[in-house]
Amino acid sequence: MSGNTHTDILLAGAFAAFTVDLLVYPLDTLKTRWQSPDFSRLFYNAATNTVNRRALFRGAYQGVGSVIIATLPSSGAFFTTYEGVKAFLNTHAHSLPHGSLPDPLIHAAASSVGELVSCAILTPAEVIKQNAQMVNTSAATASSVSPTVQTLRKFRHNPLALWRGYGALAGRNLPHTAIQFPLFERMKQAIWARRERDGTKTGTLLESGLVTAVSAGSAGSVAAVLTTPIDVLKTRIMLAAADGEASSSSSNPKPSNGNGNGLVDALGNKKTQVRPRAGGSKSMAIIREILAQEGMRGLWRGGALRGVWTFIGLGLYLGVYETGRVFLARRRGEDVGIEDVV
């Protein structure tokens, strides 16, 4: 972290998150809709046996505002924690009985701690975002109220319910980053070492960004595909968070399309509630439901799309982040080389 201040890391991380959110958010919307239990009802035409592409791609940026607001501080918190823990472990690991820790273990530990901090900030925005992405904005059901506001109204009686998905989000991100960051750091070092041997290393910001983007995108896509089942579970839990709030708010006498007291989903439609068995958890109940309805394929739904989304998004994210760190340090007159961020 030589040559970089905490402000550099916060600014670079926030700018990287903002850039990626705007560019690849539509792919995240498609992934959420594909993994939703309501995909067949909302985006599939059983009569023609085809996907309703117009409905699927409509409102691709629904909910983006909540994510932009939250990812700026959450990204800054992640990178500040990640760099701080990594520096701490590198500095103090030599005092351990068996010497220093292996780099992959340091990177995995640092990224995991960073994720725990980041997820606490990001969870409410993720819950709002995923439910807003599922709001039907077709001409027949269009409302003057934005999808984000419609989603927020479901939590007005219990705002703390917005954090119900923290365990699911952390449960997905921890193994994801534990796989991704050691691979990323190793691939990045290998590419720099090869360019050094070949005499092709230039030390420019563009080269730094490209090397980081390729390393991060490749490592991230591997981690994304491997953790797809956890991501499917996270999506279902976060969508169910709005279901629960809609259901509980219906305790205030309010008719539900004349259909009694059935559970209402993020679109205001009735659906069957997933009830855990005695002694079981809601997560296990959702997994059982997916397996019963779709088999093992259901747990891997959206894996290919998630791999592509992560390759593009994470490549841009870390590419912009590390390039930004070098740029900000050099702008202050610091003699920072690429090796300072490797």
Image (spheres, rainbow, N blue to C red):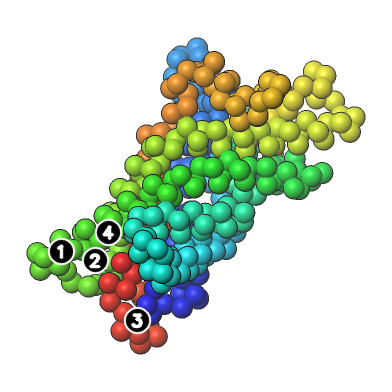
Mark 1 and mark 2 residues within 8 Å of each other at the beta carbon: yes
Q: Position of residue 174 (x, y in %)?
A: 49, 47
Q: Of marks 3 and 4, which one's residue comes earlier in the chain?
A: 4
Tell me the distance, in whole angstroms, between the alpha carbons under discs 2 and 4. Answer: 12 Å
Q: Is residue 42 visible?
A: no
Q: Which residue is mark 1?
A: 195
**Type of amino acid under label 1:** Arg
Q: Which mark is residue 188?
A: 4
Q: Please state which of the two labelled residues, at mark 3 or mark 4, is closer to the viewer.
A: 4
**Could you tell me how far apart the alpha carbons at marks 1 and 2 are, in whole angstroms?**
11 Å
Tag 3's secondary structure? helix
Instruction: Please report whichever mark, 2 or 3, sits nearer to the chain's N-terminal start.
Output: 2
Q: Which mark is residue 207?
A: 2
138 and 12: which is toward the camera: 12
Residue 272 is situated, as x and y percent measured from the top left of the image, at 69, 20
**1 or 3: mark nearer the eye:** 1
Q: Residue at x 48, y 42 (%)?
A: 28
Numbered circle sitting on residue 330: 3
Up the image or down, 106 lies above or below 38; here it is below
Tell which circle, 1 or 3, labels the residue nearer the N-terminal end. 1
Q: CA distance from mark 4 to mark 1?
A: 11 Å
- The kind of residue on which mark 2 rests is Glu
**Residue 130 shown left or right of residue 341 in the figure:** right
